[in-house]
Amino acid sequence: MTEQLVGAATAAPPADRDGREAGARRTAQLRRWRRRGLLVLGWLAMLLLWEFGSWWYGSRLLPRPHEVFLKAVEIVESGNFVTDFSASVLKTFAGFAVAAAVGAPVGYLMGRYDYWRAFFHDGVTIAGTIPAIVYAVMSLIVFGLSNLGPILAVALVSAPYIALNVAEGIRGVDRSLVTMSEAFGRTPRQIRREVLIPTIVPFVFAAIRMCFAVAWKVEALTEVFGGRNGVGFQIRTEYQLYDIGAVLAWMFLFIAFMLVIERLVLFRAEARLLAWRPEERGTAL
């Protein structure tokens, strides 16, 4: 008798579970549509405020949105968009590569050994608190009007974040996993590859996404001060010509490009690399 009751109890849940899953899907879809609606309303409110500001101050001081859009189309069609954005992207990624080559080993040492943590901690912390504009000016003083200035500025801004996040990732490794790996005869190289690196990858991506926008701004600022090409150089050129519409067009193209890199490159790469984590599987698929 008891077995029949248990069987009846276990036979009912599938229908209820399907209903709950359908309700959860509808709720999730409604939330997505709500977020999209709020996003559209936010953009419309910004455009209306921009139109009002253009009417209030005059289109010469604050060009209207469609005028800036036409300027952006003109920049893209002229070919300067590809040339200057390619220069800025290459310098930014080169700076990131230098920062990773320096910051990752320093962070690894800080996370693994108390001596190196005490040795590097104060210097890395101070380097991370220095204003970005100081790095930009210092890079121009050292390298002058060259491409090395923006690369050095990006590297100096990004390296402390990478080092600190890698150190936190190493310290967050479950020591029982390391002990178990050693008990099963795994070599230090295998432990680094199978335990340590998968643990610190999320922290590395967090550091990259955190300092990505800052690095872009520093790179553009360095080009404004003393670049020979790139987005910052074009913004400075249009400012000297007092073409406010072109300055805003370059600025919005810069923002759009950053969003594309963030959403379509970094976000998807992180989701793919971290697909083994349950919270990332839905994004990676």
Image: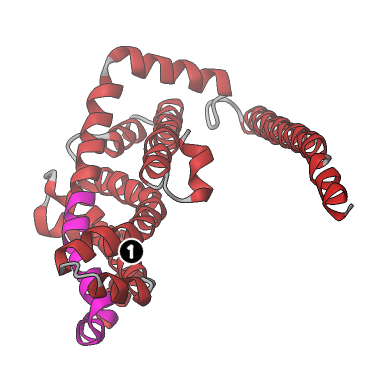
Q: Main secondary structure of the magenta part?
A: helix
Regarding residue 191, the answer to whether it shows in the image is yes
| Residue topped by disc 1 | 161
How far across and how far down the image is residue 4, in percent? 86, 47
Regarding residue 103, the answer to whether it shows in the image is no
Foreground: 164 or 250? 164
The residue segment tinted magenta is 96-121
Q: Is residue 74 found inside the magenta-colored segment of the image?
A: no
Quadrant for residue 76, please give it: top left
Which residue sits at x=49%, y=23%?
68
Foreground: 78 or 39? 39
Which residue sits at x=25%, y=37%?
88
Question: Looking at the picture, does residue 68 appear above or below residue 227?
Answer: above
Question: Looking at the picture, does residue 64 appear above or below residue 232?
Answer: above
Number of other residues with Cα within 10 Å of mark 1, as a class: few under 14, some 14 to 19, many 20 or more: many
236 horizontally vs 279: left or right: left
How far across and how far down the image is residue 221, in percent? 31, 48
